[in-house]
Amino acid sequence: MASVTLKNIKKRFGDVDVLHGIDLDIQDGEFVVLIGESGCGKSTLLRLLSGLEDITEGDLFIDDERVNGRSPAKRGIAMVFQSYALYPHMNVYKNMAFGLKISGKDKTFVHNKVVEAAKKLKIDHLLERLPRELSGGQRQRVAIGRAIVRDPKVFLFDEPLSNLDASLRVQTRVELGKLHQELKATVIYVTHDQVEAMTLGDKIVVMNQGRVEQVGSPLHLYHHPQTQFVAGFIGSPKMNFLNAKIVAVGNENTQIMLESRRVISAAIDSSSANVGDTVQIGLRPEHMSLQCEDNKVEGKVTLVEHLGELSYLYVDIPKEGELVLKIDGDNQYKAGDTVHFGIRPNSVYLFNDKGTALPRLASHIEAKKTSIS
């Protein structure tokens, strides 16, 4: 496998700047996920890595070799597309073998590679079938197998699960995770689905408008988002945000007034902020508790979503708006009920008017362990 290094990578289409200087280090064997909203540049970046698009500025290294001008076939990469891109007139075996055959590999070598990959993907019983005789998940595994047989240095995946239904997407996602553990491969994976990113990635790269917003492990991004954009993007349901103003600052505790003039405490170091500053409070649905006595808030339930082991309560807070709470599934709440819940000071996030997070003092993990009730 291989390491991948991007240094100040820029991409311009005519007068439009799409990527604004991407710096990224990917270690040998890492599973790296590029995630962001539609149009953020993640698929464009993948195409630059593959050689399907030319880099406008910057340097791309694979195993410390600069590959900017190198053709896709000579970069040691294999790409799996969202659309499968299988040859409809070829059976599974021929689809998987095609790349090796045109490169002049020996017939026995080709056969052994195809059979080995098919067994890993559990499609060895499908080798004689045509693509039209396969399910969506089976077609995607054929596309992955076609990449595996080439023994690439780097695997590139462009939203490979987006065409699958929900249950098949989960199944294929699990298979991809296990396959990565077995192959120890370097994988760069593009998705808009943050659940895929959190479950598959060793490292997540959150992109925003052609720039890297933050890079880190899934749990690091979840617990320590550096910006309001990352905080709202990572987590499901997404983080709640409320408008507020700082009324007291300190290096251990901050007092924030909501629009309803309710004051809550937060374990935030706001020593670099000022009284009167406009801020956004961030509250994760799973970090508000019906049994917590801190920062008590009252609201009216507008909707309950029962998911079995847990439920989502949509609660209207007078003069504040609607919040989403994640609570235990064995509850009897219904629309119209009044609920009281608390917000622990060490579970509050705070973002200044530029969207930058203020430093948090307490362990977010500790708050999470005790919050759901």
Image: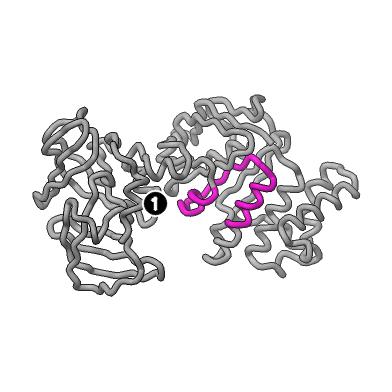
Which residue is painted at 68% across and 39% down in the image? 77
Q: Nearer the viewer, residue 23 or 118?
A: 118
Q: Nearer the viewer, residue 208 or 329?
A: 329
Whether the magenta-drawn stretch holds residue 189 is answered as yes
Determine the image quadrant of residue 364.
Answer: top left
Residue numbers of the magenta segment: 173-200
Which residue is painted at 66% across and 67% down in the image? 135
Which residue is painted at 49% across and 29% down in the image? 23
**Image location of residue 261, percent across then percent down:** 9, 49
Q: Please name the residue that numbered disc 1 is placed on.
A: 235
- Relative to 93, residue 184 above or below: above
Determine the image quadrant of residue 96.
Answer: bottom right
> Magenta residues: mostly which secondary structure?
helix
Quarter of the N terminus within the rendering: top right
Q: Could you say whether the residue bearing mark 1 is in a helix, strand or loop? A: loop
Residue furthest to the left: 261
Residue type (three-letter) at the residue carrying disc 1: Gly
